[in-house]
Amino acid sequence: MAATAERARSGRGVLGSRRGGRPKILLTYEMQSTHQLDLFPGCRVTLLLFKDVKNSGDLRKKAMEGSIDGSLINPTVIIDPFQILVATNKAVHLYKLGKMKTRTLPTEIIFNLSPNNNISEALKKFGISANDTSILIVYIEDGKKQIDQVDLISQVEGHPVSLKSLPEITNITEVKKIYKLSSQEENIGTLLDGVICRMSTKDVL
């Protein structure tokens, strides 16, 4: 997949909301990362990382019901945001062609992270579980669809953190296991190279 050009939103402003009597959740612009998709310039993908999440079970239920905007991803198996962008580019491409293998765009993004074509396995490994304390939310916007980010983040009972914190959350051992990466591969390329290769070639193997 083509690399994407980051369009980071920077500044000192904050976003926040009070929802159902919950304490206000604040999100500085520096805690999110927004990218324009190379293949689809009209589409923007935003990544939001949360730690110390207490309501993963409720969020997972909302995702299954389709009542929350975005893909809820397990960040422990994500080594770099580029991994998400590759999966998102492919998902949007298949969505526009009407050839997705799953029923929704958020689910298709999660499925595209997997190195194989087992949908249920992909959702289990790359989606969130009820006990997860870290969550990566990925959502797409285009000219016709805008996401209410304030409402979205207010549904998460956790602390938003910068994407720079991702390496502290990633479980490298688990990543190598899922993608079946060997030490020999690491000697001739990076771990990210191996992951992207597995993701991109699963349809032709």
Image (cartoon, rainbow, N blue to C red):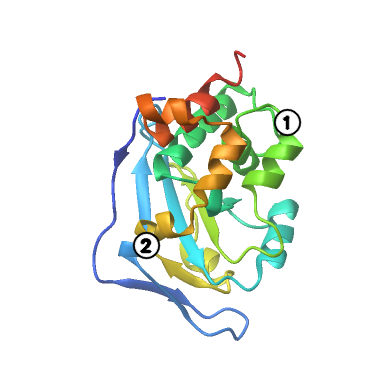
Quarter of the figure that contains the N terminus: top left
Tell which circle, 1 or 2, labels the residue nearer the N-terminal end: 1
Say left or right for 83 vs 113: left
Q: Residue at x 63, y 81 (%)?
A: 20
The x, y position of residue 72, in whole percent, is 60, 53
| Residue type (three-letter) at the residue carrying disc 2 | Ser
- Dot 2 lies on which element? loop
Measuring 67% from the left and 63% from the top, which residue is drawn there?
59
- Horizontal side of 97 relative to 4 (left or right) equals right
The foreground one among 42 and 121 is 121
Q: Quadrant of residue 21?
A: bottom right
Q: Residue at x 69, y 65 (%)?
A: 131
Label 1 CA crowd tier, 10 Å (few <14, some 14–19, many 20+): few
Residue situated furthest left in the rendering: 11
| Residue picked out by circle 2 | 162
Residue 61: x %, y % from top left:
74, 60
Q: Nearer the viewer, residue 173 or 128?
A: 173
Mark 1 to mark 2 CA distance (whole Å)? 31 Å
Q: Quadrant of residue 57?
A: bottom right
Residue under label 1: 118
Amino acid carrying label 1: it is: Asn
